[in-house]
Amino acid sequence: MIQGSGGTLKVFPPARLGLSLDNGRLTVVALTGRDRLEHFVVEGVEDPASALAAELRARELPARRIRVGLDRTQVIVKTLDLPRAGGGDLGEMVGFELERHVPFPPEEVRFDWTELPSTADQPRRVLVAACERHAVEHPLSLLAGAKRRPAALSVACHDLPALLPRELPAQRAVWAHRHGRSTDLLFLDGRTLLMSRRVIAEDARELAREIQRSLPLVRWSHCEALWLSGDEAAAWLAAPRLAAALGAPVSSPPYAPAQAARVAALPPEGAALLALAVAAGSPRPMLNLLPAERRPWTLSRAELVTIATASLTVLLGASLLFAQNYQTERYLNRLSQEIRRLGPDVQTVEGLSAQLGHKRQLLATFQAVQADGIRALPALRELTELLPQDAWIQALSMDAQGVEITGQANAASQLIPILENSSRLAGVEFTSPVTRTQDKDQFRLKAAWKAESSAAAVPAPTVGRRPRDTSSAPAAPAPATQPPVRPSRESPRGQQ
């Protein structure tokens, strides 16, 4: 909480308040840090709620919740032995069994319980604290009048173990806390409360006798230590008969170092020590008489362990994902650097691969042409040898199906048997009627390749007339009325 006055800010740490009730007397202890302890008493006033609120405001104690400790005389504390029956609600069993041990109607009972350690061959031992309804409603109405809310409602003397060290050796100890003429007896196994009693002892001998009578209630034959605190504790500690009667050492409680300083700062009275114990008590006391609907929401130890485990799991999972992402990024960076380094070599290889593919395609084309084409030169040579001297070839075209010849001859009809004798041609026939021009037959014929012939070739160029062998016969003269026909070139598709 931050309050300002005259430009000056005052910061107050959150306080832990403990309120001990004893016959209308309110004893309050506030813990507001390691070095600050507030203690005050409210008694003899008509409106204790308003007086409590005024004291809290005057001392600037801003805590909204207060732990309340009831006097031991207002509460019945019992140890119940229950059978180890399978199933059933243990709380219902405790409520049913408790009806035989309290002197007021069941509907007026307010109780809480905790299970004590026991072996498998023993009945289940349950420590129960019960009181009447008005014993709970009175402190709640008191806090409501002071505009505060309860943090817990416990038995004040049951909070005394909160002043002990957390690492306390296990031993059977009896804590006798005196305030007024009464003494609260706590039977502790280490820091675990097993039982409590309120007795009246005028001297050390009576106190020892009451302790001896109480030992069977916790199934002890003896105790290992007796701790004395509260009113007249120093005088009782000096009495030699107490230790001799119990056969156990008698000393002050072994307070925790931080709590010892707080105990020394309090006045030497039992009520103040009870209020300090209530303030330092656990937010989830072992026996909490505050109704469940009024209790503040707090995390139990099991819930804290679960949350810590879940948080650790999430943290480890996030760390694992981060490590994997980091490793992946490092690997990708190295891979990118290697790719950039090999980039020029890859481009060179890709270029060579493209050239090789182009050359392979060109070679495949040549091989296909050579395998499926026609060899024109052998066919031309054979035609030159077969055709008579008076025949002229004006046009010649070859394809995969055959050859077509256009030209002039003295007797065109004689050309068909001549060409039929060729080793390459078959099915020679005229494709148009023969006409007579200037004493020459104008013809046009075609022939197919023989099946066994291998005279396939690329289409040969169209020639104007049949070539002559000048070494064996003279060239035929051109007609007198017509000039010699020049070789003509046709470039139709599939012709040559």
Image (spheres, rainbow, N blue to C red):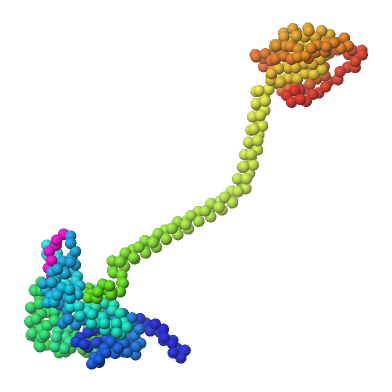
Q: Can residue 2 be seen in this view?
A: yes
Q: What residue lies at 71% left-to-right and 17% top-to-bottom?
A: 402
- Residue 82 is inside the magenta segment: yes
Q: In which quarter of the image is residue 375?
A: top right
Furthest residue to the bottom? 44
Q: Quadrant of residue 282?
A: bottom left
Q: What stretch is highlighted in magenta?
A: 80-86
Q: In which quarter of the image is the N terminus?
A: bottom left
* Relative height, residue 369 to residue 249 (above, below): above
Q: Quadrant of the C terminus?
A: top right
Q: What residue lies at 80% left-to-right and 18% top-to-bottom?
A: 395
Could you say which is closer to the camera, residue 72 or residue 496? 72
- Residue 145 at x, y percent in the picture: 29, 84
Could you say which is closer to the camera, residue 24 or residue 324? 24
Q: What residue lies at 61% left-to-right and 46% top-to-bottom?
A: 345
- Residue 176 at x, y percent in the picture: 15, 82
- Residue 189 at x, y percent in the picture: 17, 73
Q: In which quarter of the image is residue 446?
A: top right
* Relative height, residue 404 to residue 264 (above, below): above
Q: Can residue 30 be seen in this view?
A: no
- Residue 420 is inside the magenta segment: no
- Residue 169 at x, y percent in the picture: 20, 73
Could you say which is closer to the camera, residue 210 or residue 245? 210
Q: What residue lies at 25% left-to-right and 91% top-to-bottom?
A: 46
Tag count: 0
